[in-house]
Image (spheres, helix red, strand yellow):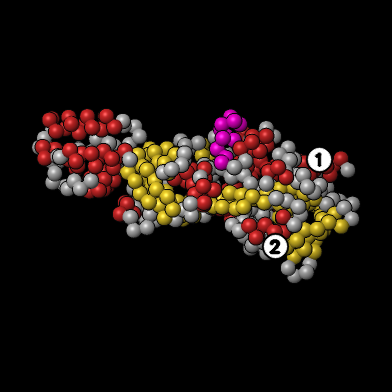
């Protein structure tokens, strides 16, 4: 009699487990249960609708260093299925990927529906059954099989279960998993932007600076990269990476902290002061606002001058030392108070989930319950922005599929 695998969750990790298991063992009956009415929702919205499939890296150590939680776990897992495997898997199915300057990889179509379509075709090709609006409320076991219960009192039976339900924002939502004997790391948000309510910097909405150093006061948290001013406050890769590395620390602060922004990390303080001194002698009649030597966007340069009480008419001949000091401070150590956070578009990620000591990274099988597997964000693994979370989804889904089919074939 054919064995049955039920995958709980119709996202990237769940689909990758299901379609690969069905392909690796054609006799295995595979079903995906999705609690909502939509499949692959994060895949659709990732990367502004382009889907940031993975990151261009051939170094497992370097890649695993981009996971604030789960670094050692993914380092082991990547030996089985890594970035080049992801690239080859999609290319073999007619979906070539391309690499952008920052290492992010997208389908050459720049359309996430290309990835969605590929996974749906695989599911259809290998006979994967998909059931929408089916939320599992409880898992138990009977006669060596799993019993999955639903709110309408219906049940389903399975020989193998892979839980790929994604992350939950509240600890209470993990109760159906903790009841199986698993330990849950409390969930906190990751990958969020910094809110600066009523701060004048919000007037710069849309201004982007490619290389900024930003650090959080009274912590060791510091990142360098692009920063974007928004109508909420500050966003961009540097901010998102800070939010990921500091997810638990910032949660403990209730998202109330001071940031220090160096808008010109390429310039030392001595260089900035020398430039201003030279301008006093060589360009005394020039207006300060017209001598933007920093390379910063003009709107930001004007904003920082205004914050230093330097008006549009001030010339270098009349530039007092006090205002010079204020400008230098604004350029190299601008401070602001963060009061809250905002989810970054639809690409929210949760830090927390099934504690990794409960799961074997070589198989993704539970150490607490045989034939129960995990994949994706339900595990206490999360990466920074840039394709890292999807790579974990593909890797964990593939490893679970391989382990499930290996066991099924050995029975």
Position of 2 with respect to 48 (left or right) is: right
Q: Residue at x 75, y 70 (%)?
A: 152
The secondary structure type at the circle numbered 1 is: helix
Residue range (magenta): 57-68
Q: Earlier in the sequence, mark 1 or mark 2?
A: 2
Distance (Cα) linking label 1 and label 2: 28 Å
Give the answer, above or below, for where 190 lies relative to 81: below
Give the answer, above or below, for where 183 lies relative to 318: below
Q: Residue at x 67, y 57 (%)?
A: 174
In x, y percent, where is residue 38? Answer: 62, 60
Q: Mark on residue 135?
A: 2
**Dot 2, how many residues are within 10 Å of its Cα: few (below 14), some (14-19), or many (20+)?**
some
In x, y percent, where is residue 116? Answer: 61, 51
The secondary structure type at the circle numbered 2 is: loop
Give the answer, above or below, for where 68 lies relative to 199: above
Q: Residue at x 34, y 46 (%)?
A: 335
Residue 393 occupies which quadrant of the picture?
Answer: top right
In x, y percent, where is residue 232? Answer: 39, 56
Position of 175 with respect to 223 (left or right) is: right
Q: Is residue 47 visible?
A: no
For the C terminus, which image quadrant?
top right
Residue at the spot of label 1: 406
């Amino acid at each position: 009699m054919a064995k049955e695998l039920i995958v709980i969750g119709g996202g990237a990790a769940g689909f990758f487990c299901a379609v690969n298991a069905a392909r690796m063992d054609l006799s295995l009956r595979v079903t995906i249960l999705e609690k909502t009415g939509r499949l692959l929702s994060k895949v659709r919205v990732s990367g502004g609708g382009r889907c940031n499939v993975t990151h261009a890296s051939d170094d497992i150590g370097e890649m695993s260093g981009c996971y604030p939680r789960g670094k050692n776990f993914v380092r082991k897992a990547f030996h089985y299925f890594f970035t080049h495997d992801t690239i080859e898997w999609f290319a073999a199915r007619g979906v070539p990927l391309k690499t952008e300057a920052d290492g992010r990889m997208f389908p050459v179509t720049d359309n996430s529906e290309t990835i969605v379509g590929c996974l749906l075709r695989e599911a259809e090709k290998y006979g994967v059954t998909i059931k929408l609006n089916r939320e599992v409320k409880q898992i138990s076991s009977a006669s060596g099989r799993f019993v999955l219960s639903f709110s309408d009192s219906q049940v389903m039976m399975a020989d193998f279960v892979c839980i790929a339900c994604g992350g939950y924002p509240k600890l209470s939502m993990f109760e159906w998993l903790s009841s199986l004997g698993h330990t849950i790391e409390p969930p906190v948000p990751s990958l969020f932007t910094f809110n600066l309510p009523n701060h004048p910097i919000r007037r710069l909405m849309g201004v982007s600076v490619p290389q900024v150093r930003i650090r959080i006061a009274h912590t060791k948290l510091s990142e360098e990269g692009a920063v974007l001013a928004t109508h909420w406050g500050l966003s961009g890769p540097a901010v998102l990476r800070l939010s990921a590395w500091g997810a638990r620390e910032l949660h403990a602060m209730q998202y109330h902290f001071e940031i220090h922004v160096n808008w010109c990390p390429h310039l030392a303080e001595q260089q900035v002061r020398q430039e201003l001194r030279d301008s006093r002698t060589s360009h005394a009649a020039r207006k300060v606002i017209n001598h933007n030597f920093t390379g910063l966007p003009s709107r930001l340069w004007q904003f920082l001058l205004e914050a230093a009480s330097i008006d549009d008419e001030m010339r270098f001949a009349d530039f007092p030392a006090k205002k010079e000091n204020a400008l230098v401070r604004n350029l190299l150590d601008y401070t602001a108070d963060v009061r809250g956070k905002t989810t970054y578009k639809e690409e929210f990620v949760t830090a927390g989930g099934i504690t990794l000591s409960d799961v074997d990274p070589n198989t993704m099988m539970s150490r607490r319950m045989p034939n129960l597997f995990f994949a994706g964000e339900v595990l206490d693994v999360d990466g920074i922005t840039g394709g890292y979370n999807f790579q974990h989804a593909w890797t964990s889904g593939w490893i679970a599929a391989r382990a499930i089919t290996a066991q099924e074939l050995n029975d």
